[in-house]
Amino acid sequence: MPDSGKVKLMKPPERTTLKSRLKTYMLAGLFTTLPLAATALVIWWIDKFLRGFWPEQYRDEFYVSVVSLVFIVLVLLVMGAISHNILGRQLLRLGDYLVTRIPIVGSVYGTVKQVTEAFNSGRSAFREVLLIRYPHEHSWAIAFLTNDAPRHFNELADDELLAVFMPTTPNPTSGFLMFVPKKNVKRTSLSVDEAFKLIISTGMVLTNEETAERKEEERKKNA
């Protein structure tokens, strides 16, 4: 609230129309389908590439696709084993170095690699579960703390900012990167897993502790 003591009146949130709901569902479906479609496209392309090595009379057989799928799984297993080997790690580093020297491709590869390593590291990619004010000052949304904001951002905003990821529901793989003042966030006691359950279930699945407490309260009422 401003220091002058004036109360800032907020417009009530507009009712969601059928058009906006359809748009939301369309976007959620798009972001859910895209990773699956991309994976299927890569597998199809590899399968098509491998079929070229077979004699022409066998290329349309179903078992050729099965062999291709087995080959892909074996390649992934071998790459995983190499990455855990000292010599293999050195080779992968050399490959990373060469790829990152390619214009444009290098920057994209480096960014994707950093994000992947963050999610696959021993610690959670999300540090804490927060509550931030969104979309207006009278409501709160779940967000994940990802990092401190760049110092340049703090200087521009003349405030200490946090980098947070606010996921959409029920598809938390899409969302918004936001930089919010540290003083305006509320830190929760929820774990990242509990927050994800809450988001994916659109608020229907509560934490185990709270579910047990509510069941106990209901049992006492009915006793």
Image (cartoon, rainbow, N blue to C red):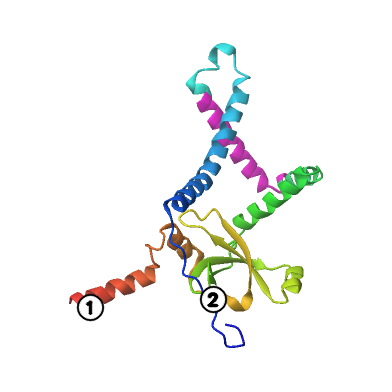
Q: Which mark is residue 6?
A: none
Amino acid type at image mark 1: Lys
Residue 136 in magenta? no
Residue 41, above or below 110: above
The residue lying at 40 percent from left, 68 percent from top is 207
Q: Secondary structure at mark 2?
A: strand
Number of the label disc, if any, that sits on residue 220: 1
Picture coordinates of residue 122, whole percent (x, y) = 60, 60
What is the spatial separation of the Cα atoms under label 2 and label 1, in whole angstroms? 32 Å
Q: Is residue 69 magenta?
A: yes
Question: Which residue is drawn at the image coordinates 57% and 34% (left, top)?
Answer: 41
Q: Would you call the spot at circle 1 few (<14 residues within 10 Å), some (14-19), or many (20 or more)?
A: few
Instruction: Bin the neighbour count of mark 2 within 10 Å (Cα to Cα): few under 14, some 14-19, many 20 and up.
Output: some
Mark positioned earlier in the residue sequence (2 or 1)? 2
Q: Are marks 2 and 1 in contact (CB under 8 Å)?
A: no
In this picture, which residue range is highlighted in magenta?
Answer: 65-88
Left or right: residue 73 compared with residue 114: left
- The answer to whether residue 89 is left or right of residue 126 is right
Q: Residue at x 49, y 22 (%)?
A: 63
- Quarter of the figure with residue 162: bottom right
Towards the viewer: 48 or 181: 181
Q: Amino acid at mark 2?
A: Lys
Give 98 or 196, whichever is nearer the viewer: 196
Rendered image: mark on residue 186: 2
The C terminus is located in which quarter? Answer: bottom left
